[in-house]
Image: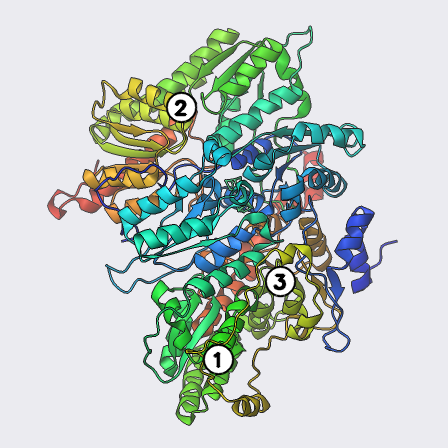
Amino acid sequence: MLLRHTTDKIQERKALVVNPAKTCQPIGAMYAALGIHRCLPHSHGSQGCCSYHRSTLTRHYREPIMAATSSFTEGSSVFGGQANLLESISNIFTVYDPDIIAVHTTCLSETIGDDIAQIIAKAQADGKIPEGKSVIHANTPSYVGSHVTGFANMVKNMVMYFSKSSDLKREQINIIPGWVEPADMREMKRLTTAMGIKTVLFPDTSDVLDAPQTGRHQFYPKGGVTIPQLQTSGDSKATISLGEFTSLPAAKALDAKCKVPFHSLDIPIGLTATDRFIQTLHDVTGAAVPDEITDERGKMVDIITDMQQYFYGKRVALAGDPDQLIPLTEFLVTLGMQPVYIVTGTPGKRFEERMSEILTDAVPDAKCKQAGDMFLLHQWIKQESVDLLIGNTYGKYIARDEDIPFIRFGFPILDRVGHSYLPNVGYAGGIRLLEKLLNAILDRQDSMSLEESFELVM
Amino acid sequence: MPTNRRLTPEEIKQNLLAAYPVKVARKRAKHIVINDPTPETMPEIGANVRTIPGIITQRGCTYAGCKGVVLGPTRDIVNITHGPIGCGFYSWLTRRNQTRPTSDDDDNYMTYCFSTDMSEENIVFGGEKRLKQAIQEAYDIFKPKAIGIFSTCPVGLIGDDVHAVAKEMKEKLGINIFGFSCEGYKGVSQSAGHHIANNQLFKHVIGTDDTPSDGKYRINLLGEYNIGGDSFEIERILSKCGIDLVATFSGNSNYDAFANSHMADLNVIMCHRSINYVAEMMETKYGIPWIKANFIGAKSTAKSLRKIAQYFEDQELIERVEQVIAEEMQEVDRVQGAAKARCMDKTAMLFVGGSRAHHYQDLFAEIGMKTVCAGYEFGHRDDYEGRRVLQSIKVDADSRSIEEIHVTQDPDKHNPRKTPEELESLQAKGVSFKDYQGLMIDMDENTLIIDDISHYEMEKLLDTYKPAVLCGGIKEKYAVQKMGIPCKQLHNYDYSGPYAGFKGAINFYTDIDQMVNTRIWKLITAPWQAHPELIATFAKEA
Ligand code: SF4
Ligand code: SF4
């Protein structure tokens, strides 16, 4: 057994986290910053954090993840990291020539209390920031929240640093996509383009973290939201904010700063969440929904009606991040499945509230935990097993031990490809999810059925 | 006018430095040297000093070196990361250390991640209470024989005394509990963490179990971490030769073996950088000599086995070793020949770790590939220039913060395995003790040696040398490959391996052959991009 010390006996834990279902803020900030065109993320702290974040993002995307670090040593920990950050800023602009440096803090620089805004102001005053270039920052102390919080903080500060309102309102809307994959951001843009809606989508990691092999390393790939685009977000007609944990803080900030009204929705994963997304796009802009999209929806519904019997009543365990788990769980309920155990490492009561809205009637005995961990999830599974496990790659240890079909979903995925190239959102993403679910369920049936009842047609 | 003239190493070096601000260029210049392998005239290289902020470095932190590298591969210690969640999460199973529990009941916590997941409140009011509680919970749930506590950056800053907590809980629970002050900022790279790990293992674990071990030729293997099963292959070879492995630090290891490791008669060091401290301390305290060995490369493996056999001065063992080598080399030679035919004269660059950038050159040489430049991520001067320079290394402020433990002869347990005369006679026969000659002596004259290479320098070098393969780590992997050059990861072997020993050599030849010769590198350009003029003509005519 891989996780041989996990038993069904649950003892209360107040201090020990075992097999986390979250990681720390800076990695989220780094990921968000990569969604700005020609941006170099910078980690202000010791170099280990930066190395870890780059490594994890690299394993997930199999793409170059470029980021710099202030490389604190003991001295900087005692005297503060200002000198290190100033030196970093001038070295980065000289050697790597980004348009923008996005600084995030680490536990170390937060504990020291470095005032990043003040250091950036000093860099500006000292002439260390070349004309036309920017340095922004987000505070990302990992002893608060999770990687999700760090992502939200960096996205919010894109607004704080760049969004401007002028007298000229633009015929465009903002989409804050939440922590989703490049393919998902691309899919959101495809949908809005099909509806003829002009958008500013930020951050946008498509064409950054799914860059083609060309024989040349493009240090700053062609994708990413540009600074001029970000600036105009203050003049957009509305903001569609996807995911309360990852996007809402930015949407609220934009409303407060530039009076851009926002609509807070779930990430469009699954049928009904996508319906709400498309409906809201239509309501906000008046744009008609083209047949192309309605047909896609029809195809997705068609698969569900055709294959309904295979979903019905299947018990599912899930681990991941709140903004994905909420619509995903809703989708499983739509399919007639039984999401019985759901864990996120990210703290936030709102998660459990939303889950209970979704599950109270459909799966009254479901167990759901915020600030939980994978060890707890595994213990629940030990108590009564499930038909399917959905989670990031770490779930495969549970899946193997318990012999449960497993679908990789979320972050990080370290052992398969596809997640960065093919969407999970929208109706197209829904069809992909359906295919994955069915493959897992039907492959299982194929491998477990008796020879006499082995089915050709299913 | 650009000419096709090959740039001299000095010109290449100057090109690398040209883009830097003056102060940075001055610092980096010390880390880039043009090799002269003759010890008397070998240049001095700048190493084990702070990385320049903002430069984009390969390096990680002290915690990574301590918890990840040295203690990570031991299966039956519950390793609790004391800090916010990230550090523990990232070091969870990511290093590919394999382990083989001896039975279903044998403890194995390597698949687990334990963390105190500190919150803001702990940062403000201190985390000692939480740590104690976490240790108690770990004990209650898992009942391990030992618990290790690893401090991350904020811990040192807020002043939690992990050693006091460890001591208190050790007394309370009656199992061995020890702490590591391996906060990320404690040194300039992972290397500081290795040292801290060595110290604490030596203080708290090694030598705590005096059970005599069986076997005639008892050795410890130091600095071998069982990435991709390397230790398994070395274990296989050693056991075939009849050599008994008491403990490996720390591939496929367990707590009890560490505790008993002072009963071995020879310490054999693989990765000098990460573990030489333990070897030195064990020699002083227990009288166990150490030799440097290398099981990377078939020839080096054979050489290392012969060295061990010679040390024991036993004809039977010497013959057995020769027999094993002869047997194993048959398959090695066959695969080597085939790979060599396809890889001959291709070039490699190696920028990785603190020993692999050296060791892996042997494997490349065996298939006819030449290393044109190399360097360590966290090596010290002695890893480049050899231990002969140890005395002349200046200890700077960053290294001074790492504890140097003062070790003396153990009045009861010290037992010199060889007399000074025996050592001398062995030395005369070519078994050199306490010696590592470093990487530079083995590299050609005029090759470039670069310490703590920056990303910028690496890309520039790739453009200049256009090697057939670059060896690096995960952070370099895809940037290099985007340039159309295959990148072999030498921290994790690209999820392949083992690469150590004879079978490992065979795997490596095959993997490199496959990597540099795979068709896809020739298909990067689309046909219409390769011949744009043809398409243009066609379009015009149409
Ligand atoms: S916080 Fe410190 S210990 Fe943790 S990864 Fe960063 S540098 Fe290393
Ligand atoms: S938890 Fe804090 S110290 Fe650890 S990796 Fe994350 S930012 Fe660095």
Name which residue lies at 46% across and 35% down: B122
Residue A430: x and y, percent?
38, 27
Q: Work out whether B171 lies above or below A234.
A: below
Q: Residues within 10 Å of mark 2 (few under 14, many from 20)?
A: many
Name which residue lies at 50% across and 63% down: B198
* 3D distance between C-alphas at marks 3 and 2: 52 Å
Q: Work out whether A448 lies above or below A371.
A: below
Q: Is residue A330 visible?
A: yes
Q: Provide the residue designation for mark 1.
A: B287
Q: Provide the residue designation for mark 3.
A: B379
Amino acid at dot 3: Gly
Label 1 sits on a secondary structure element that is loop
Q: Quadrant of residue A250?
A: top right
Label 2 sits on a secondary structure element that is helix
Q: Provide the residue designation for mark 2.
A: A427
**In the image, A45: left or right of B162?**
right
Amino acid at dot 2: Tyr
Residue B267: x and y, percent?
47, 76
Residue A356: x and y, percent?
29, 20
Number of residue marks: 3
Q: Residues within 10 Å of mark 3 (few under 14, many from 20)?
A: many
Give the letter of the chain under mark 3.
Answer: B
Label 3 sits on a secondary structure element that is loop
Name which residue lies at 65% across and 62% down: B375
Q: Work out whether A325 lies above or below B2.
A: above
